[in-house]
Image: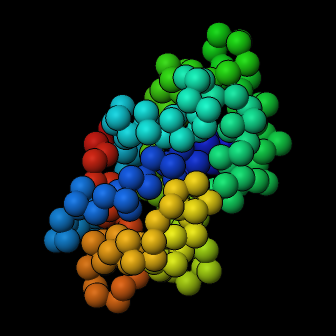
């Protein structure tokens, strides 16, 4: 799996919390014009949430099976054949698992999140490919990740990000939301 695909996957997971907690989202007047081509770095708390989503049995380490299951849930099943290669690179102590320290080391070596990674995350949510994310698409993606959310809650999440009033999240709105807590590196 390319570094971008690995980061896409990590980022898809880490950013779900903003959809569940609209109060933590960006203010509606923030512009993202300076972000094109930027490299952004998620904080440790966000990466812990990503790690915890991979670690479905909560034993403090990610197995190849857990990694594959989460990839499939995100619609990235076509990359599961690359998991052994990823583990050969990321599993620094050779125990067959990825612990949080190794997970963070892989993130740091990856150089952060690029705007193209955020665009890939957008496409993962935009299941019908129309360039906008609906409440139904949010509900579907959260369901694939094992999260339960009512359609009304998903509509509230979308409205919290929607700045143009069309009850959908477009790429600009998504980019603004996703870069909320990232720092430029």
Taking the image as drawn, is residue 60 in sight? yes
In the image, is 69 to the left or to the right of 138? Answer: right
Residue under the point 51% across and 70% down: 139
Q: Which of 168 and 119 is in front in this view?
A: 168
- Which color mode does the image show? rainbow
Q: In this view, does 62 lie above or below 116?
A: above
Q: Give the residue displayed 45% in from the left and 77% down from the top.
A: 151
Q: Is residue 35 at least partly visible in the picture? A: no
The answer to whether 147 appears left or right of 129 in the picture is left
Q: Where is residue 81 in the image (x, y as percent from the top left)?
A: 83, 42
Residue shown at the point (49%, 19%) measured from the top left: 101
Residue 172 locus on image (x, y percent): 36, 72
The image shows residue 120 at horizontal and vertical percentages of 55, 60
- Looking at this view, is 69 or 168 the one in front? 69
Considering the image in quadrants, where does the C terminus appear? Answer: top left
Quadrant housing the N terminus: top right
Q: Quadrant of residue 46?
A: top left
Q: Which residue is drawn at 51% across and 49% down?
A: 13
């Amino acid at each position: 799996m390319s570094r971008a695909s690995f980061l896409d996957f990590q980022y898809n997971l880490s950013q779900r919390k903003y959809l569940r907690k609209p109060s933590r989202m960006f203010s509606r007047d923030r512009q993202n014009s300076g972000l094109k081509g930027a490299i952004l770095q998620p904080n440790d708390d966000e990466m812990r949430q990503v790690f915890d989503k991979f670690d479905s049995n909560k034993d403090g380490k990610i197995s190849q099976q857990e990694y594959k299951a989460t990839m499939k849930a995100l619609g990235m099943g076509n990359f599961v054949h690359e998991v052994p290669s990823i583990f050969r690179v990321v599993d620094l102590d050779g125990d067959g698992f990825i612990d949080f320290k190794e997970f963070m080391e892989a993130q740091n070596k990856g150089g952060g999140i690029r705007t193209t990674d955020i665009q890939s995350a957008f496409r993962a949510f935009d299941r019908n490919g129309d360039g906008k994310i609906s409440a139904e698409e949010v509900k579907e993606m959260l369901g694939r990740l094992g999260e339960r959310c009512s359609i009304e809650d998903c509509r509230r999440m979308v409205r919290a990000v929607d700045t143009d009033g069309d009850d959908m999240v477009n790429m600009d709105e998504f980019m603004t939301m996703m870069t909320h807590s990232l720092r430029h590196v």
